[in-house]
Amino acid sequence: MNDLLAIVLSFVYVFLALGAAEALRRWRGYAVDFTRKFVHIAVGMWAYGTVLLFRQRGAAIIPPLAFVVINAMSYRVGLFKAMETGEKGRFGTVYFPISFAALIWLLWGRPHLLVAALMPMTWGDALAAVVGRRAGRHYYTVCGSRRSLEGSLVMFIAGWINALVPLLVLAVPPVAIDRAVVVAALTAFCATVVEAISPWGIDNLTVPAISALILVLLFPR
């Protein structure tokens, strides 16, 4: 596919996700904490679109870099209501596209690792927040960060499953299933630990970073 078309499709996809989240917020009355995670998952899943549609790393990095700026503007003026809580100091929506862009630049040519590195943050963190808020009963505090055991367990399981998929379907040559299962589990575990000790919002930087580090160490060239 032509990279210009891929860029257009990237913006269309993200704005459709934002529109769907806003519709859920207005028409169904979902809280911003929910619609924010909806957008988070939708955008993270575009990692698959990125590695499948783009030909050049320089073009693939344009959409996430653009959303660093767009999301920073939204944070300041509340441009996307479904994505902004109104709380000061929560820069997660800005940090996530920074991580996305960094991983595109560093792991381009290794699509299975690029996508897998984003999945613990995309699914694990999002579902952990939702489950922890709704069903959390057993809490713990590490380095001033309060988390629930239920949320952390969900993050580990969701991160494990979703990091495993790209290792199995995108790797060339294919990765042995038993090795992929172990590597995905270790990646998800380290991501869960780092998320638990990261200050609010910083986990959008630290979790993809540790996930990428583990994957690169375990899948050296």
Image: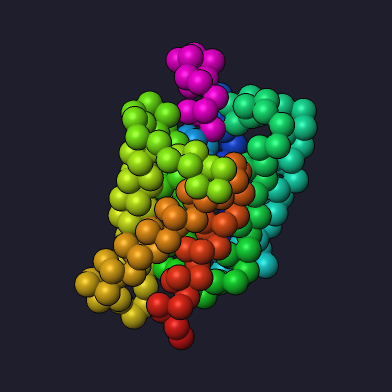
Q: Is residue 75 visible?
A: yes
**Image point (33%, 56%), residue name:** 160
In the image shown, does 105 or 183 lie closer to the viewer? 183
Q: Position of residue 100 (x, y in %)?
A: 59, 57
**Count of numbered circles on the image:** 0
| For residue 95, above or below residue 24 | below
Q: Is residue 213 left or right of residue 219?
A: right
Residue 161 falls in image quadrant? bottom left
**Where is 194 relative to 213, above or below?**
above
Residue 49 appears in the picture as rendered = no
Residue 29 magenta:
yes
Q: Residue at x 49, y 38 (%)?
A: 146
Q: Taking 166 as reference, is 19 left or right? A: right
Q: In the rendered view, does 210 fall on the left or right side of 152?
A: right
Q: Nearer the viewer, residue 173 or 55?
A: 173
The magenta segment is 24-36
Residue 200 versus residue 133 in the image, above or below: below
35 falls in the magenta region: yes
Residue at horizontal 38 percent and vertical 26 percent from the top:
134
Residue ranking furthest to the left = 178
Q: Which residue is at 70% across, 54% downward?
A: 65
What is the magenta segment's predominant secondary structure? helix
State the image quarter where residue 71 is shown: top right
Q: Percent x, y for residue 38?
A: 47, 35
Image x and y of residue 14, in percent: 57, 41
Q: Is residue 94 left or right of residue 37?
A: right
Q: Where's residue 79, x and y in %?
A: 71, 28
The colour scheme is rainbow
